[in-house]
Amino acid sequence: MRYVCSVCGYVYDEAREKTAFSDLPDSWKCPVCKAAKAAFVPEAPKEAPEPAAKPAAAPGMNTVSEEEHFTKLSVGQLAALCSNLARGCEKQYRGEEASLFTRLAEHFTQSTPPDPETSMEALSALMTEDIEKGYPALRSAADALDDRGTKRICVWGEKVTRMLLSLLSQYESEGEAFLRDTPVWVCSVCGFVYVGGEPPEICPVCKVPSWKFDQIEGREPA
Ligand SMILES: [Fe+2]
């Protein structure tokens, strides 16, 4: 029996390892990306590929009214949007635009009211909802439009969300010891988070080299 890491795709082969997956301790982690044991799923049996179905018609791109195309964003969403746009401008070496979007993101961040409902459970529930409902819905819309960019966002985003959920559950079970004296690295391309001394040589999700990882500071020294 083989088990696959839902974050990076590493395969644990019981025959090769000579240890049943179920016999591994709960503290066992993926040797590549350090996702928790719970992030592994049994490998699906290989099936003959089905002939490609013609994608369904795009979901009403030409039938909805102009008003329905617009969504009112919260200030928090605007902050995230502007910070993403700043990052996009940086990648295209458009420094002036990047700094303007960064200023806008800071402005919206400061205007975001604190959320009294914030909790680990709420965060975990939001990420689970993204995995179970958000990404499948986005993927089917991207398939219908044959939008390659959005399809890639779905693949990377789902893996990164699974990793964040795995890190959250490890933090919940180990507490502060999980992060003590350990740097935290974030892939600047896909957002994959790695907790450990050095970043992985290659990002397990988007495959960029280690120099694309940023070390995240900001924790109070122990
Ligand atoms: Fe990455």
Image: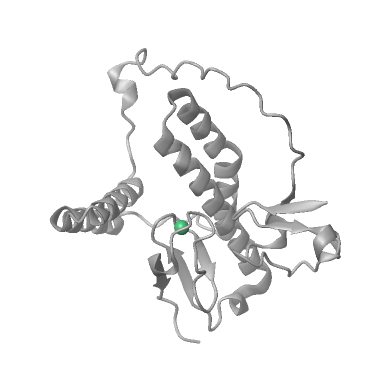
Provide residue 160's location: percent of width, then percent of height: 52, 54
In the rendered image, the vertical position of residue 89 relative to residue 31, given as above or below: above
In the rendered image, the vertical position of residue 138 relative to residue 25, given as above or below: above
Name, please, the residue furthest toward the top.
Answer: 63
Q: Is residue 127 left or right of residue 189?
A: right
Q: Is residue 102 left or right of residue 13?
A: left
Q: How many marks?
A: 0
Name, please, the residue furthest toward the left.
Answer: 96
Residue 174, by quadrant, is bottom right
Q: Is residue 16 left or right of residue 103?
A: right
Provide residue 214's location: percent of width, then percent of height: 39, 69
Provide residue 37's location: percent of width, then percent of height: 72, 61
Image point (86%, 61%), residue name: 20
Residue 74, by quadrant, is top left
The scheme the figure's colours follow is one colour
Image point (48%, 54%), residue name: 206
Provide residue 96's location: percent of width, then percent of height: 13, 56
Image point (39%, 61%), residue name: 188
Can residue 122 be seen? no
In the rendered image, the vertical position of residue 196 relative to residue 137, given as above or below: below
Can residue 188 be seen? yes
Q: Compare residues 119 and 57 and report the one nearer the observer.
A: 57
